[in-house]
Amino acid sequence: MHNRFRILAALLASALLWPASALGFDHSFIGQFSTVTEVGSTVPANGDVNPYGIATVPSSIGSLVRGDILISNFNDQENLQGTGTTIVQESPSGHLSLFAQINPSTLPGPCPGGVGLTTALAILPNGYVVVGSLPTSNGMAATAQAGCLILLNSTGHVVKTIAGDPINGPWDLSAVSNGPYSALFVTNVLDGTVASGETPTDGGTVVRIDLASFFGHAPVVTSERVIAAGFPQRTDEAALVIGPTGDALGNEGTLYVADTLGNRIAAVPGALFRQTPIGNGGVTVAKGGYLNNPLGLTIAPNGDILTANGNDGNIVETTPFGAEFQPFETEAGAGGLFGLTVAPNAQGVYFVNDSNNTLEDLH
């Protein structure tokens, strides 16, 4: 009966925006950390800026070093959005190296519009890396095109692209793997967005892409399916586009999504096996409260949801039932945060700081 009461109380909190501490949720993951340390610059030799995606390398293979962090850059050296072409690798001690510089003219498959690397970044088994591209020709939303997912091997060479419906402006993604099989959960923000401009539309989607890799070959797509639809989205002069961003698979197969424009966390139940899309942007877990345009999203070791606020630079921890803990103020400021990931051995949280183009460590 006690556990049932806690669950009912937490569900009520998602509607009333009560803090977690008021409901008996006293142990947050980020609450044990108090210090932010700058790891180092994320700017490679070609001058790309605006770090977006982030992923921790799980094991050493090829050019990938276990415990290092991969980071994708969205802007070029002229700070034009949707034109960044580099993925860098940074060690916990701050050593920066170039993992890949992607040439749009030599891609082995279609990628409508070219290359502009987004927050969509993950590492698959055998060292394959997948990154999203939402490209522009001049840094303006009016020139944004559908883009693609780009698959690289462990030495940073592009081996294939995944493009075409239902991929349209891949903005972020997460991946889960079991043996040779992987599932990508990709948020898309360009379905009708450019045509509508800054007038919000509800065309944002989450697409599940199932992959299989055998006998040392690059992963091949076995299915693509829209599993969630109806997320609000629009173009934005400063941010290029605002729509569903970070996602991550939580306990019991529920996918959590940062609905940036809706200022909420949404849930997509049964995401691994869902055959039909859930509408209306999924089920609301939390809305408002400490959330302030959530962008990056990851799952903490305790099962809570960590999100990076785009409007104030805070990291927010939310339980799967919608109760919130006091946020951590990173001092990155508005527009500073995007991707974040739990550090190896749960020793902290790595996040990118767009305000000064650095990788930082909350520990």
Image: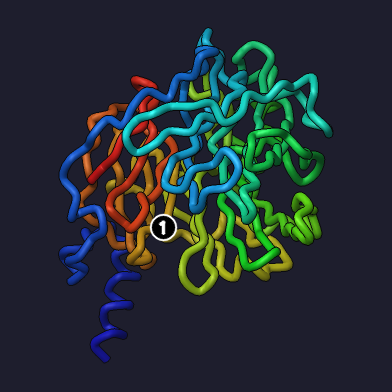
Query: Where is residue 354, by image quadrant?
Result: top left
Residue 238: x percent and y percent?
48, 19
Q: Which residue is mark 1?
A: 299
With 223 as the anchor, is 55 left or right in this view? left
Q: Residue furthest bottom?
A: 1
> In percent of the image, x 29 and y 62: which residue is there?
323
> In percent of the image, x 31 and y 32: which residue is there?
39
> In percent of the image, x 75 and y 60: which residue is there?
212
Identity, as a three-letter code, of the amino acid under mark 1: Ile
With 240 as the anchor, is 301 left or right in this view? left
Q: Nearer the viewer, residue 2 or 196?
A: 2
Q: Residue furthest top?
A: 78
Q: Is any atom of residue 349 visible in this view?
A: yes
Q: Nearer the viewer, residue 264 or 180?
A: 180
> In percent of the image, x 16 and y 45: which residue is there?
34
Residue 204 versus residue 7 in the image, above or below:
above
With 88 as the anchor, is 190 left or right in this view? right
Residue 23: x percent and y percent?
20, 69
- Name the element at disc 1: strand
With 16 as the anchor, is 196 left or right in this view? right
Residue 87: x percent and y percent?
56, 30
Query: Where is residue 6, by image quadrant?
Result: bottom left
